Image: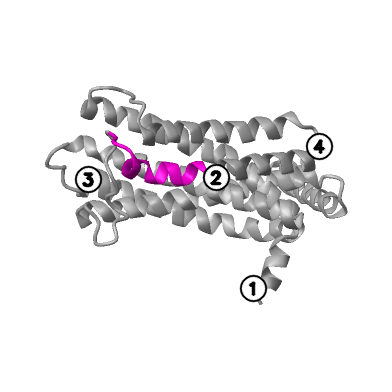
Amino acid sequence: MFMRFFHRMASPPYFYVISGRWLPWLAVICLALILAGLYGGLVEAPADYQQGDSFRIIYIHVPSAWMSLFIYVVMAVAGGIGLIWHIKLAEMVAVSSAPIGASFTFLALVTGSLWGKPMWGTWWVWDGRLTSELILLFLYLGVIALYGAIDDKRRAGRAAAILALVGVVNIPIIHYSVEWWNTLHQGPTVTKFDKPSIHISMLIPLLLMAGGFKLFYLIAVLMRLRSEILERERNSKWVTALVGSEDRRQKTEDRVQESDVDPRRVGP
């Protein structure tokens, strides 16, 4: 059953149709999670006993940092699937994820610097966590640049997938950098095996924001995938039929609107 669903989802026409049905629902849930997380983190959560209200930047910084790692892993796995099984949609997932992951990585670096200035007295330090996160941003930009430099999109997707797979080695370095080296960056507070070092009133909004950011990524990558599918499949029969049906629908709506405002059709 799962394999049948997987094969159907790998079909660009089927994926295009089903993703269009998912997007409105995902957007509503994403908005609800982010609003609840922001309210809980910025209004309901108490101030930190050491950092005061400046700690509240974690509700943007920490989910962004988590997403920077998560998206890169998704990108590399999708690229690997595309290389091994030659699935076009997997290649599209990889290349469509790169700009979104780069944005989250940049946001994590910027918000980390904004938090570091009052806490550490400097905008930037070349410690293991920050340096490896900066390398991650360069890897994302490298995947984007490599894909854009090759005209043949299938060859470009395979080249970008190889670069993404090579860069996976940086992910465990980022995760364990605070344990392997002496660093100003604080250690893990949420992912401890015994219990998190953060109060539940602060933890719940953080998890809500993390869920909202994941759904935002899903929405963004689905929208980019739909555009990428139409671009690559523009000469296929199903895209031609889809565009034709959209044109007919738009013409019908235009005629209805014109008839509504035509004064000759308005009664006394």
Furthest residue toward left: 49
Number of the front mark, 4 or 2: 2
Residue marked by disc 3 = 43
| Percent position of residue 78, x then y | 64, 52
Residue marked by disc 2 = 168
The label number, if any, that marks residue 152 in the structure image:
4
Furthest residue toward bottom: 1
The label number, if any, that marks residue 2 in the structure image:
1
Q: What amino acid is at disc 3?
A: Val
Local crowd at mark 4 within 10 Å, few (<14), some, or many (≥20)? few
Helix or strand or loop: what does disc 2 sit on? loop
The residues tagged by marks 1 and 2 sit, at their Cα atoms, a distance apart of 27 Å
Q: What amino acid is at disc 4?
A: Asp
Image point (23%, 23%), residue name: 121
> With 109 as the anchor, is 46 left or right in this view?
left
Task: Identify the mark nearer the N-term, 1 or 4.
Answer: 1
Say if the magenta span includes residue 188: no
Task: Identify the mark nearer the N-term, 1 or 2.
Answer: 1
Height in image: 231 above or below 84? Answer: above
Helix or strand or loop: what does disc 4 sit on? loop
Task: Identify the mark nearer the N-term, 3 or 4.
Answer: 3
> With 105 as the anchor, is 116 left or right in this view?
left
For residue 137, say whether it is visible. Answer: yes
Q: What amino acid is at disc 1?
A: Phe
Q: Give the range drawn in magenta.
A: 168-183
Task: Identify the mark nearer the N-term, 1 or 3.
Answer: 1
Image point (34%, 42%), residue name: 180
Height in image: 261 above or below 192? Answer: above
Task: Identify the mark nearer the N-term, 4 or 2.
Answer: 4
